[in-house]
Image (cartoon, rainbow, N blue to C red):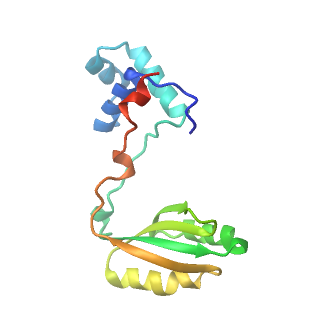
Amino acid sequence: MTKSAQFDLLDYQIILELRKDARKSASEIARALKANERTVRNRIDRLVESGAVRLTSILDPHAFGYVNTVDIFLEVDSDQEQSAIEQLLKMHEVSYLAYGLGTQDISIEARFKDNAEMRQFLGKVLPSIPGVRVKGYALVPRILRNIDEWLPKPEDFEG
């Protein structure tokens, strides 16, 4: 999303309330913020429609036994890129997929229940995709901040 929409302190306060409990109703948020319920409801709608906020459920991979996380850096032949991306998007192990800084680089994050699954994925599954080479990887013993915990700077809400 580009910064075409202006956000203010009320938007920031609404976002903070939704982060505490995304199931909280507009009326509950309005009461907590001492704001008009219709205004809060309209702000939530605008935040969602603009793409600034996505109301979704976040799953904890550990709750499902996915205790190993690895960041993987791939080099993909440009003529195979679209096909490789389509295959990667279908893999349940892949929790994140993005273009990297280089023109042929793709970065993924993958999750596994154990080291054997991770080893199989790195050594057999990824190399079997045409045009894909594993450039490197890093085991992630602990994620310190995830995307669902990120916030813009407070001054971004001085619209």
Q: Is residue 143 left or right of residue 134?
A: left
Which quarter shows the N terminus?
Answer: top right
The one of 26 and 108 positioned closer to us in this rendering: 108
Of 57 and 74, which appears nearest the observer? 74
Q: Position of residue 59 (x, y in %)?
A: 35, 55
Question: Is residue 133 toward the left or the right of residue 30 in the image?
Answer: right
Residue 140 % position (x, y): 32, 69
Q: Is residue 67 visible?
A: yes
Residue at point 58% right, 37% down?
A: 2
Q: In the orientation shown, which residue stands out farthest toward the right?
A: 79
Residue drawn at the location 46% of the way across and 72% of the way down: 72
Residue at image coords 58%, 74%: 75
On the image, which quarter does residue 109 sit in? Answer: bottom left
91 shown above or below 36: below
Residue at left offset 53%, top offset 37%:
51
Instruction: Indicate the quadrant where residue 103 lies.
Output: bottom right
